[in-house]
Image (tube, helix red, strand yellow):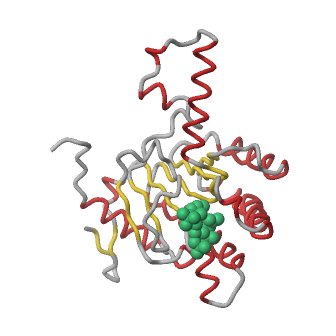
Amino acid sequence: MLKSGKDEIKADRSCLPNHVGIIMDGNGRWAKKRGLPRTAGHAVGVKVFKKIVFYAKDMGLKNLTVYAFSAENWKRPEREINRIMQLLDQMLDEALDDFMNQKVRIRFLGDRSRLGQKLLEKMELVTNLTAQFSDTTLYIALNYGGRQEIVSAARKIALDLKNGLITEDDITEENFGKYLYYDDLESVDLIIRPSGEQRLSNFLLWQAAYAEFWYSDVLWPDFTPGHLEQAIYDYQLRNRRFGGI
Ligand code: IPE
Ligand code: IPE
Ligand code: MG
């Protein structure tokens, strides 16, 4: 364990997880506790997201996936959905320079068909402008569902099979992964979920087969770099066996 001046826990930079996923949950409850509308929680949540992304980059994390909006979140009131989309749109404007300066590659994970044209164009722009960077990749899961991702892969495979591009024997675990949203998105090593919930909520189902979980009661707007340090520190103490002994 590395210790900083104030005896805060610091994760060991020499054996960081290759891919960390964060389910950014608890914005609504954070706002409710303060008598504010849920959207106020989302606004603070976006600020925390930016802070954590750049902290993770400074730590040297290679791959970070954040769950920003699930395929099931369309069940929410239209006003809340619109505000979340607007906040994401604004964030992409405001943070683009920082992403470029910090050399963070941005990619989006999810089904694009239900997203607005303006947001889609911005996503495309941010993806293209940061595509050249390779040290840290931030995957923003937006209208993402793990089951939807797997079904979309199955459909692509069915098409390739029908067109004679592959045979049944080509459908292996390794090849299946190539049909997912990104063929090079690696298995997630650690999934962090604040807000007290202990569930996956359809996040990275395929990639999470052997993920370690870290839960905390802290609500996302209260999440700090110290929580990230703690989560990775705890992860580093785990014994990952992958079915072995
Ligand atoms: C997570 O916070 C943000 C999104 C799902 C977009 P919530 O909005 O789910 O907050 P709680 O869980 O209701 O507190
Ligand atoms: C998961 O949180 C999705 C995101 C954080 C974007 P939810 O708040 O939607 O999950 P449930 O409904 O509590 O499972
Ligand atoms: Mg929630």
Residue 179 is situated, as x and y percent measured from the top left of the image, at 56, 29
Q: How many marks?
A: 0
- In the image, what residue occupies the spot 25% across and 58% down? 238
The residue closer to the viewer here, 138 or 176, is: 176
Q: Give the residue furthest to the top.
A: 164
Residue 199 is situated, as x and y percent measured from the top left of the image, at 45, 61
Determine whether 109 is above or below 239 in the image. Answer: above
Determine whether 49 is above or below 243 in the image. Answer: below
Splitting the image into four quadrants, where does ligand 1 fall?
A: bottom right
Q: Is residue 6 left or right of residue 113?
A: left
Residue 149 is situated, as x and y percent measured from the top left of the image, at 58, 40
- In the image, what residue occupies the spot 61% across and 28% down? 155
Q: Give the residue furthest to the front.
A: 75
Q: Give the residue furthest to the right.
A: 118
Residue 36 found in image quarter: bottom right
- In the image, what residue occupies the spot 79% across and 64% down? 82
The quadrant the C terminus occupies is top left
Residue 116 is situated, as x and y percent measured from the top left of the image, at 82, 51
- In the image, what residue occupies the spot 59% across and 21% down? 158
The residue closer to the viewer here, 194 or 126, is: 194
